[in-house]
Amino acid sequence: NANDLEITDENIGTATFSFVAIFDEEMDVNSVPAITFPVENPLSVLSYNTDSSGWLNNTTFLAKYNVADVNFTLMNVDVTCAGLQDLAGNPQVVLANPNYIDIEVGVGVAELGDNVVTVYPNPAVAGQNIIVAMSQIPADLSIQMYDLSGKLIEAYTQKSLAGNQVQIQTSNLASGMYFIKLISAEGNATMKVQVSK
């Protein structure tokens, strides 16, 4: 992964994900930096934990986040840090970190309403069908498969499904990571699958 930080299922919990801002001069520790996500919005999975965050010393700020247990995938999240001043009262330059984090929480086995959804085999060898199985198929179900760039690779509707599963052909897929998104009135779920040759 080319990005600096990853948030995964291992980070689910209270104050389990951290940003550390290190400044090259002493800062006014009576204020708190504004850490924002200017383009993408990960706030349905990340929430700032005020009680666990703070200055470690006059050049290092630790920002702690709670990570929710939800199905959520967002890649290349930009992060900025601003709103501080040094001890002489000079404003801090805005620190911009493009494509700084990837968030992949709750992908693999998922729930869609009362349904448990499984994807197997995972990883899959190219040429081997990937099976998306559910205990019950919602009448309005749509299944979409995307590559890492967000390009739609395959799409299925409830009418094209046989029984309680769909088989996705992999023979024309390049090796790599793909996301399978299930959409229905009962909710949405996203699962990650690896294809190798």
Image (spheres, rainbow, N blue to C red):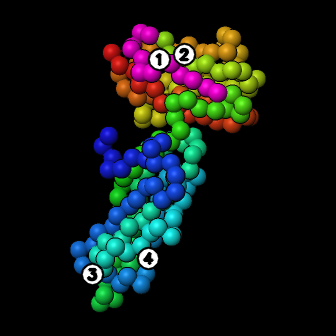
The reply to whether discs 3 and 1 touch (Cβ–Cβ < 8 Å) is no
Report whether 175 appears left or right of 44.
left
Name the residue carrying label 3: 26
Task: Locate residue 125, reporting x and y percent.
Answer: 39, 14
Q: Amino acid at mark 2?
A: Ile
Q: CA distance from mark 4 to mark 2?
A: 48 Å
Mark 3 residue crowding within 10 angstroms, few (<14) / some (14–19) / many (20+): some
Report whether 44 appears left or right of 185.
left
Q: Residue at x 61, y 26 (%)?
A: 117
Q: Amino acid at mark 4?
A: Val
Q: In the rendered structure, does residue 117 fall within the stretch colored magenta?
A: yes
Residue 85 image-quadrant placement: bottom left
Residue 112 image-quadrant placement: top right
Name the residue carrying label 1: 121
Mark 4 residue crowding within 10 angstroms, few (<14) / some (14–19) / many (20+): some
Magenta segment boundaries in residue numbering: 116-128
Q: Quadrant of the N terminus?
A: top left
Name the residue furthest bottom: 88
**Element class at badge 4:** loop
Sequence-wise first label, 3 or 1: 3
Q: Amino acid at mark 3?
A: Glu
Q: Which mark is residue 131?
A: 2
